[in-house]
Amino acid sequence: MDNAVQQTDGDLPLTQLRPITPPTVADHVFEELHANILSLALPPRTKISEAEVAKKMGVSRQPVREAFKRLAKLGFLLIRPQSSTTVSLISEKAVLQARYIRAALEIQTCRTACEKIDADGLAALWSLIEQQREAVAQNDRKKFHALDDQFHREICLRSDLDYVWDLIHESKGHRDRIRMLSLTTSSQRLALEEHVKLINAISARDTDAEPPASPRI
């Protein structure tokens, strides 16, 4: 071996890892507000204030302020200093970007799933399909939406593509809001049919199967 690239143990170019910190109060406030915005429990143009959120959640205003800044950076809140803070309108540009990201990732994800998902994984996916059928029968949009996400997350996890789901999760928020507005019984049934076709393709190890027309992974 070339001496020029040899290193002793003491010369390893590694940095010391910092202790992993648990979620902060600000993280919890962010997740709560984020979930309510995506589910439209807090619809566009809703006015919210640091003081009101802090009082209802039983926290100080500082973590709420931090959560507001994070949500504003993601485009979900519009903060007007000395005026008001409102939930943003749904951005067409952000929705199209999220759709593009999902479409770009979907083909390779499906191919990898065909190679990696085993019998246990397929059983887990079929179980989620049955739960989705129940949600459709009850016309429970919120439950179906959650199960839809769980289904596609499961595909990524069972395919050792955790990072793909992380990328999707980070970008899909704006699209989630418009999905909640448009998720009818008919669209739920269509999504369910697409899920069944996807599992059948994975079961058949059909890596050339065409992905659903409306990418949801």
Image (tube, rainbow, N blue to C red):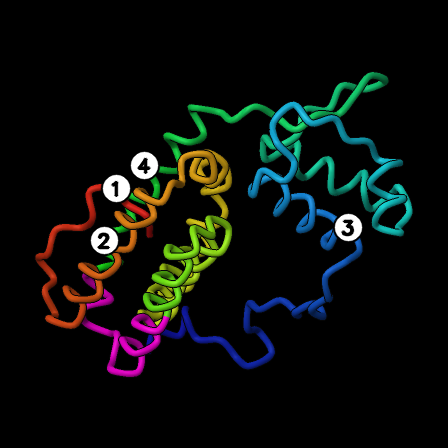
Name the residue carrying label 3: 26
Left or right: 141, with 211 as reference point = right
Label 4 is placed on what type of residue?
Answer: Tyr
Name the residue carrying label 1: 214
Instruction: Give the residue drawn at x 73%, y 66%.
Output: 22
Label 1, residues with CA under 10 Å away: few <14, some 14-19, many ≥20: few
- Local secondary structure at mark 4: helix
Instruction: Give the residue drawn at x 76%, y 19%.
Output: 80
Q: Position of residue 57 (x, y in %)?
A: 83, 50
Label 1 is placed on what type of residue?
Answer: Ser
- The span from disc 3 to disc 2 (Cα, nearest Å) is 38 Å
- Disc on the earlier residue, 4 or 3: 3
- The span from disc 1 to disc 2 (Cα, nearest Å) is 9 Å
- Local secondary structure at mark 2: helix
- Disc on the earlier residue, 4 or 1: 4
- The span from disc 4 to disc 2 (Cα, nearest Å) is 18 Å
- Disc on the earlier residue, 4 or 2: 4
- The span from disc 4 to disc 1 (Cα, nearest Å) is 11 Å
Name the residue carrying label 2: 194
Marking on residue 100: 4
Q: Which residues are magenta?
A: 111-127
Question: Where is the N terminus found, in terms of image quarters?
Answer: bottom left
- The span from disc 1 to disc 3 (Cα, nearest Å) is 35 Å
Is label 1 in contact with label 2 (beta carbons under 8 Å)? Answer: yes
